[in-house]
Amino acid sequence: MKLTHFRVQRIGLFAALTALVALAAFAAATTSAKPAKKTKKVDIRFAATAGKTPVSCSDPITGLGSTGATADLRDLRFYVTDVELIGEDGKAVPLKLSDGAPFTLRSSKGDVTLIDLENGKGACAEEGSRAVNSHLRGTVPAGKYVGARWTVGVPPKLSHSDVVGAKAPLNLTAMGWSWQYGRKFVKVELTDPAGPGGTWAENTFFVHVGSNGCTGNPATGQKVKCTTPNEAKVKLASFNPARQKVAVDLRRMFAGNDVTANAGNAPGCMSEQTDPECGGIFGALGIDWKPDGTGTGLPSGKQTVFRAIGR
């Protein structure tokens, strides 16, 4: 009897200890678990304008450049990366981009979104496509934000790769520099409304902005280095994406250029540091450029192309 009583006591003690261990583990788990942080959705919209007038591929644009020329829009696309919202305290918080193929790519090498404001109609039919994207969508921690900033460009590890086989939106031949395995960060093209028989020096004024002076072949595993990165940094100190959108103002972009003329080199601006047409374009984008070729291609001054307007 004493032996049986002893066994019962041992069993009871073991059960009690087991219960205490389980209770302690539960308590530790509940106290160490942190509540999930609240987030808010963000939708930054872009719109092509010429001053206060909306722009499309189907209607001529008036008042462009130093001569107030009329032009047709042939293309309007650009890449955006490093998107951040600015809080009331002045601190910048990264926007976690939403998955949005074929216009947004998230990867370990960086995130990038293609803003495509041409619709493949009218003068954009030759190189454009019907698919458009005017949105940057993502999430940030819940809170109050008063501004936004981003880079017009592509992360270097993504930019200098072969277009063939690349994931969207980096797989577009129209947005690639075929001779240096990089991307055109900005592609805007204007054409003479009168066509090839018109009065412009060249039928099309090209704006192809991308890194230049690049060496190294990524196809063989070499690291690419560029003397002029040519990325535009945009900061809207006062911007509410719930009530405002971002105007891409072509009048401001071409204000320092005569789009009907060609002062030298390729028609328009192909990111060459000595191309006279690049001075006005780079100035509008806030990128350092000098006519003697000593420009750094780094952010310099304030860009004027992107601004906040009401939705």
Image (spheres, rainbow, N blue to C red):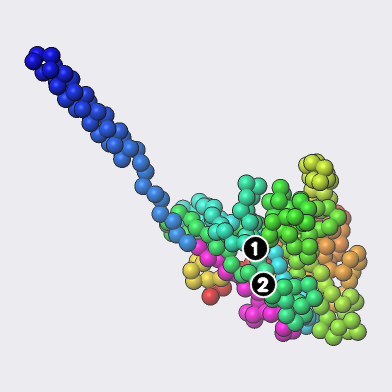
Residue 29, numbered circle: none
Say if 217 sits above or below 58 in the image.
above
Q: Quadrant of residue 262?
A: bottom right
Instruction: Please name the residue shown 88% across and 84% down the image.
Output: 198
Please state the horizontal and vertical placement of residue 123, each as a whole percent of the image: 77, 80
Q: Amino acid at mark 1?
A: Pro
Label 1 sits on a secondary structure element that is loop
User: Is residue 97 among the parts visible in the rendering?
Assistant: yes
Q: Earlier in the sequence, mark 1 or mark 2?
A: 1
Residue that sits furthest to the left in the current view: 1
Residue 131, numbered circle: 2
Q: Is residue 62 magenta?
A: yes
Please state the horizontal and vertical placement of residue 38, each as a whole percent of the image: 40, 54
Q: Amino acid at mark 2?
A: Ala
Please state the horizontal and vertical placement of residue 136, each as a whole percent of the image: 58, 63
- Residue at image mark 1: 102
Instruction: Please name the residue shown 61% across and 57% down the image.
Output: 150
Query: Magenta segment, principal secondary structure?
Result: strand
Q: Quadrant of residue 100?
A: bottom right
Which region is colored magenta?
Answer: 42-65
Closest to the observer, 238 or 134: 134
Closest to the observer, 148 or 36: 36
